[in-house]
Each structure stands twice: as C-alpha cells, then as structure tokens.
Amino acid sequence: MAELVTFGETMLRLSPPRGTRLETEGELDAQVGGAESNVAAAASCLGVDAAWCSKLPANPLGRRVTRALRGHDVTPAVAWDDSDTARLGTYYLEYGADPRETTVVYDRANASITTVSTDELDTEWVADADVFHTTGITPALSDATAETTHDLLDIAAEANTLCSFDLNYRSKLWSQEAAAIAYDSLLPRVDLLFAPLRDAKSILGYDGDAEAVARELAADYELDAVVVTRGADGSLALVDETVIEEGIYSDETVDAIGTGDAFVGGFLGELLTNGDGALTPAHVETAQAHAAAAAAVKRTITGDVLVSTRAEIESVLADESAGISR
C-alpha cells in the first residue's frame, strides 16, 4: 500500500502550440493531468510512495493515463469501465498572451469516473494510507463522485488516516451555491485544508485577511491545520494556534497549469517524508517552504505535472539568488 492516496479524475489535455488558436491549429499536444493525480506525482518527487484511485475506461485512453502515472512513480488503483459508453474526459487548453487570456474548454461530461461507486474501489488503499487527499473538483463531477468522496473520507477517518482536502473551486463545473453546500458537508471530515483565499471568501462567505479566514475555518470545522493560499502574496498556515507565512519564488513561467497541485503535493511530500505526517508547527513550516519551491519549479515545466527531484527542490530552497518574495 501507499503513504499518500488521492482520489479524483484525470483527463487528457490537448493544446495547440503557443500563439495559435484551437479553431485553426491542426496539431494538438497531448498531456495527462488531473488535480489529484498531479498532487500524487508531485509528492512522489519528494520520495513519497503515492497512489491514485479513480475509474477509467478500459480502452487505450484509460491505459494511457495509467502508463503516464506509473512514469511519475504513482500507482494507479483504479476501477475499469468496460461498458459501451466508457470514456475519458478531456480538456482543451489554449495558451493566452496579454491581453488575451489562457482559456480552457472541457469535454468531460459522462466520463467513466462520473459513475464511480465506493464498492468498485479497493478502499484498503485509503484505510492503509498515512494521508488521503482529494479536492472540491471531484464532488462537482456527479452525484456518484460526491457520494464516493464522502465515503472515502469516512473510511479514512475511521482508519485514522489523515484527511487532506483542497477547495479547488471550478466555476465551469458547478455554481457557488452548490459548492458551498458540498464543502459544508465535507469539511467536518477533514483534518488538513488547503483553501485559496478567493474561494474561502466567495464560496464560503468568509471575510478578512488570510489569518482571520484561517482561524474561522479552523474553528468552524474543527480542522487541525489550514493552509490559505493567496497567489502572489504566498501562503499562510495555521496550526496549533501558530501562524506561519511563506512567500513565493520568482520564476520564469512556462506553464502555470498545475501550480496549485504542485504546491499541495510538495507540502504533503515533505510532511510525509520528514514530518511523519504530523501536523506540528515545525513540520508545517518546513512543508510549506517545500510547497512554495515545488510550485515554482512546476511553473517552469510544460504540462500539468511536476517533474523534479527532492535535490532540485531543495536547491531552490537553498539558493537565495532564486529570488524569494516574502
């Protein structure tokens, strides 16, 4: 079994070359990516034994996903869909340049994961893990994924597996009202929460600065630790009434997609390898620093997934010339 187990959807990402449009370009680059598998892959870069649970179509596209994840040292623990309607979700990414935004077009409706049920999955992966992680993307996909997310968090809690959750709101998947209801039902099951400040404010209705939001979230949902991310202003963690702030590293951004996942994976990877999964102020501070470095390295790499090593990430931490902004 694995130290870290994640659950969610992984898709095929199709992108035209930079400076071209989806509606005119004839060639598309194919990459595999999904929030939860990205987290597992990033954590594996720091030496964590990681696995990813999901449901995939039993066809070449589904097998492409598992081959890709194995290449990132992530073990796929999947249910296979051999129905006539089995399909893998895809998304199309068109890179922007000022003043044109980067845009995403989803084609993920009725993907195999939207029919997943708990009894299809080998839940021993979750029960035997040190940390179970999922995000707010997964329950947004369907009623089935929402129910299975609840079940897996319950299984993890009963087994004393640390439950980690990233709000990760996606407006193209559900409304703010629907997300708020779902978050409110899921967060009482969570130990460690990653919350983008904008999501905590716009979806859950919190107000104030990052520290105020972290304290209210921790109190309302009895969380052991909260990490509030705030873009260019870095992150703030609250654990045992201790506030820890971390900046960001300046970087040459090649591809920003997956930055948040690399942050979470870097955090969990360091927490598990050198902190034994313990949410103490000292361990969280170190994990938060590794998370910032992992996020910066990811932005230099094309694709959804962080491809790095512990040595490279720690070289960023050690190099003052890398230009950390605190």
Image (cartoon, helix red, strand yellow):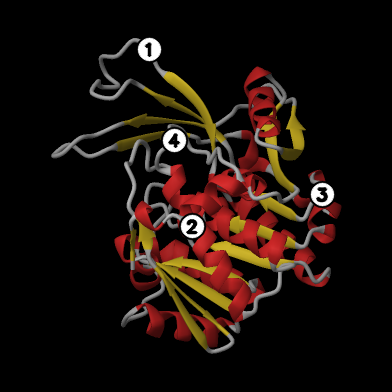
Q: Which image quarter is the C terminus in? A: bottom left
**Mark 2 in CB contact with mark 3 (< 8 angstroms):** no
Q: How far across and how far down the image is residue 286, in percent?
A: 57, 68
Question: Would residue 140 be found to the left or right of residue 27 on screen?
Answer: right
- Residue underneath mark 2: 318
- Residue underneath mark 3: 119
In depth, the one of 103 and 209 nearer the eye is: 209
Q: Nearer the viewer, mark 4 or mark 3?
A: 4
Among numbered discs 1 and 4, the one appearing first in the sequence: 1
Q: Nearer the viewer, mark 1 or mark 4?
A: 4
Quadrant hosting residue 278: bottom right
Q: Amino acid at mark 3?
A: Asp
Instruction: State the separation of the CA atoms marked 1 and 3.
Output: 40 Å
Instruction: State the separation of the CA atoms marked 2 and 3.
Output: 46 Å
In depth, the one of 82 and 34 nearer the eye is: 34
Among numbered discs 4 and 3, the one appearing first in the sequence: 3
Q: Secondary structure at mark 1?
A: loop
Q: Nearer the viewer, mark 2 or mark 4?
A: 2
Instruction: State the separation of the CA atoms marked 4 and 3.
Output: 37 Å
**Mark 2 in CB contact with mark 1 (< 8 angstroms):** no
Q: How far across and how far down the image is residue 18, in percent?
A: 28, 25
Instruction: State the separation of the CA atoms marked 2 and 4.
Output: 20 Å
Q: Nearer the viewer, mark 2 or mark 1?
A: 2
Residue 8 visible somewhere in the drawing? no
Among numbered discs 2 and 1, the one appearing first in the sequence: 1
Q: How far across and how far down the image is residue 283, in percent?
A: 63, 73
Among numbered discs 2 and 3, the one appearing first in the sequence: 3
Q: Amino acid at mark 2?
A: Ala
- Residue underneath mark 1: 27
